[in-house]
Amino acid sequence: MMNVIQKIDLTVEKFNMLKSGDTVVAGVSGGKDSMLMLYYLLQKLQELDLRIIVANVEHGIRGQASIDDSAFVERFCKENGIEFRMLKINAEKEAVLAGLGVEEYSRQKRYEFFSSIECDKIATAHSLSDNVETVIFRLARGTSLNGLGGIPAVRGKIIRPLIELTSDEIVSACGEYKIDYVTDESNFENVYSRNKIRNEVVPILKSINPNFENAVSRFINSAAEDESFLRSEAEKYVDSVINLDECRGLDVSVKKRVIELYAERFGVTLDEKHLTSVLELCDKTGKTQIKGSLFAYANKTQLYFANADETEPSFEVESKVVDVEVYKRKLSLYKKEFTFVCDCDKICGNVSVRARQEGDAVTLISRNVTKSLKKLFNELKIPVNERNKVPVICDDRGVIGVYGITLDKRVSISGDTKRCLLMNIKSEDIS
């Protein structure tokens, strides 16, 4: 039968958590979970040539007991030659000043501290039991399929080697391997919602199904797989604007994720109310407020986010047509006065100036390649919410230039050029 260390090995291998030579910051409170995790990392120290740094946060919540717990971890590290770092905070007072709950504030400070230490990986001791509690907590408050995916085994630098172990397995392993740990007595007090779930809700559900936690684990994995697939499908439709013609035929589950991914580009996480209101815009023209001055707007073909004063960019255009020889003689003067110059006789039909639209592309003179403006703006790292402000110059055939950035090869000046079109474009954001 597989022992706990072997089971952790499988988790670490499955999620590719560790590689040879990694510097690992281990978040260690002194409790059973984190001490088992530290024990595991020490077993892998020589095999993987790891450098382990233990990071401990003394939250200042439980008086002397909290201080003693940190001292326990520090003493263990000193006795075993492990690097030790500690952060002391007064979570209750500082949380009030930050306008956050004590649990959320403490969580933020922990991860800030862990991330401040240079390393390859940050190991936290979240277990399957923690994951189950998280899913129940989110269900009680309302969540999406993404929320039901629970705590990820890996997120960026953060790894969770114990994420497939139950609390009972951890207690048993600590006994088997004679691992000393401290017990936070506040975990047995039902002051916080998570404690109520751990101490009251989970035992009831385990009385119905003793294998309840593993059953939830299977559900979490299934939910995470489904969410990953739906988001990958949604990624195909996320651009600087949302093309409504493409999205109208999508299943509502994918359509919602297109909107959520698009909102993430603006640093916004949509709650159910705002997601529903934006979703309704896919079938009509109009607008809805997202946050502060940020609104979602929809016309017949596009849905996009913009600040209230950025929705309809207007451009003031000054233009002049001159003979190419005149242009050459007055080159210095014209370059000061006009920013955009092209071959006037290569223009097809009328010239107009507008914001970028879906499908716009330009042939770059320097590289002789045709590139979509989406890719061009991505290369130039122009923020999504700034792209609507960039003037795009067009004729009846298509784009002939992007103001201040490039000219299309089709209308470039050559030895055959007889007349030049000179343009200067102004808006509130471009001078």
Image (tube, rainbow, N blue to C red):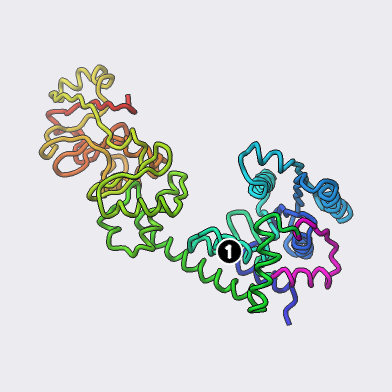
Tag 1's secondary structure?
helix
Residue 282: % across, % down:
29, 54
User: Crowdedness of circle 1 by 10 Å Cα count: few (<14), some, many (20+)?
Assistant: some
Q: Nearer the viewer, residue 310 or 62?
A: 62
Residue 199: % across, % down:
71, 65
The answer to whether 332 appears left or right of 149 in the picture is left
Q: Mostly what secondary structure, the magenta segment?
A: helix
Q: Nearer the viewer, residue 84 or 303?
A: 303
Q: Which residue is disc 1 drawn over?
A: 135
The answer to whether 24 appears left or right of 296 in the picture is right
Q: Quadrant of the C terminus?
A: top left
Query: Which residue ends up furthest to the right in the rendered image?
Result: 79
Residue 118 visible? The answer is no
Give the residue displayed 17% in from the left and 28% down from the top. 421
Residue 195: % across, % down:
69, 60
Is 216 drawn above or below residue 19 in the view shown? below
Residue 376 visible? The answer is yes
Is 343 drawn above or below residue 84 in the view shown? above
* Tally of numbered discs: 1
Q: Which residues are the magenta region?
A: 166-188
Is 113 drawn above or below residue 51 in the view shown? above
Give the residue displayed 69% in from the left and 57% down from the top. 124
Residue 393: % across, % down:
22, 36
Q: Any magenta on residue 134?
A: no
Give the residue displayed 62% in from the left and 54% down from the top. 157
Q: Amino acid at mark 1?
A: Val
Q: Quadrant of the N terminus?
A: bottom right
Q: Any magenta on residue 173?
A: yes
Q: Nearer the viewer, residue 68 or 40?
A: 68
Query: Which residue ends up furthest to the bottom in the rendered image?
Result: 1
